[in-house]
Image: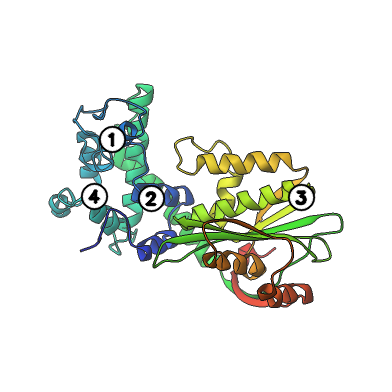
Amino acid sequence: MFFKGPSWPDYSFSLLWKLKIPPKLKIFAWLIAQGKILSNEQRVRRQLTLDASCGVCEWPIETTLHILRDCYKARDIWNTVLMPRHQGHFFQMDFLPWFQTNLLSQAVWCSNIPWSLVFIFTCWYVWKWRNHQVFQGDDDVSPYPKQLIVRAVHEWFKASHVLSKHNHKVQVDLKWEPPISGQFKLNVDGSRRNGSGHIGAGGVLRNSSGDWISGFAVNLGKGQILEAELWGLFFGLKLAMDKEINNLVVELDSALAVQLIQKQGLSDVHPLAALVASCWELMHKINCCSVYHVYREKNCVADCLATWSYNLDLGFYIFVDAPAWIGPSLIDDLLGFTRSRLVPTDLLV
């Protein structure tokens, strides 16, 4: 048994984020695993259409599995990249075991390229070509799909392999750094308990002297860590607005959340699109607001507040004054206490 229910176990999501695949394909894989890509089955559930059939082959119910594997066009593409001895088993598995087994596979395809890389690239191109045909009436499938997919896989594999050879790590001492005079700093963080799935967030506003301006913690119920990180950013920006703060530097330790915020033209079908748009709106209302990724060693106070949120009832709580239990972390920041971490040399600034 790979699964006990309709969603992935927590350890699998942890492995997903560690996969050596392009960041946009990590997000794509996460959406697939959550069942959040918009098949016509999903569009009917969301009352976006009355027709659940496949727009390519007219199969009565277009599920995620049908789009990615079972539609005849998808199957034709898979047959070009699969080894003949693997084709039978590949097309017989149920959706979640099929997706997890292939995405987390340790098998090697050819030329030492991981099968998991070929798998997710193929899923991406199948999805992309399907959308072109359904929404633009354009049968955009390459006459040589295998060559196109293999070329994209080789380019990514070569680039990431060359980078990893030069991506040595060194130990550095990291500490929270106050903003320059006249600026304020907002540190936010999200948290998730793997066992229960509960999520929360927290954050702190400080001035250039490191003085506490305000802080918050929010119990968000259940969800995924990326949701927690973005909600933390949203509530932190809202707090800064309520305090009429400008010249704001925002730091959080989720590189993926920062990437979504900095990404232009996020698709409306992304499940977090509305939340990201709300964060953008708040940022634009604050004069001189910038968002940066930092390592968690520079974000300890926000981390403490996010973890503390599990002690609260559902909802948002403001700390006008710093609570006593967070005193040690605040003092560490004020004194410039450092914490060590191994950091890739190409990321040192």
For marks 1 and 3, give the one nearer the viewer.
Answer: 3
Is residue 48 in view from this perspective?
A: yes
Give the SS element for disc 4: helix
Mark 1 or 4, nearer chain start: 1
Name the residue beneath numbered marker 4: 95
Across and down, in percent, residue 86 comes to 17, 54
Q: Residues within 10 Å of mark 4 (few under 14, many from 20)?
A: some
Looking at the rendered image, the disc whose residue lies closer to the viewer, 3 or 4, is 3
Kind of residue indicated by mark 1? Glu
Q: CA distance from mark 2 to mark 3?
A: 39 Å
Where residue 308 sits, quadrant-wise, is bottom right
What kind of element bears circle 2? Answer: helix
Decide: few, some or many residues near mark 3? Use Cα within 10 Å; few <14, some 14-19, many ≥20.
few
Mark 1–mark 2 distance (CA, rounded to whole Å): 19 Å
Label 1, label 3: how far apart the Cα atoms are: 45 Å
Residue 189 visible in this rendered orientation of the protein? no
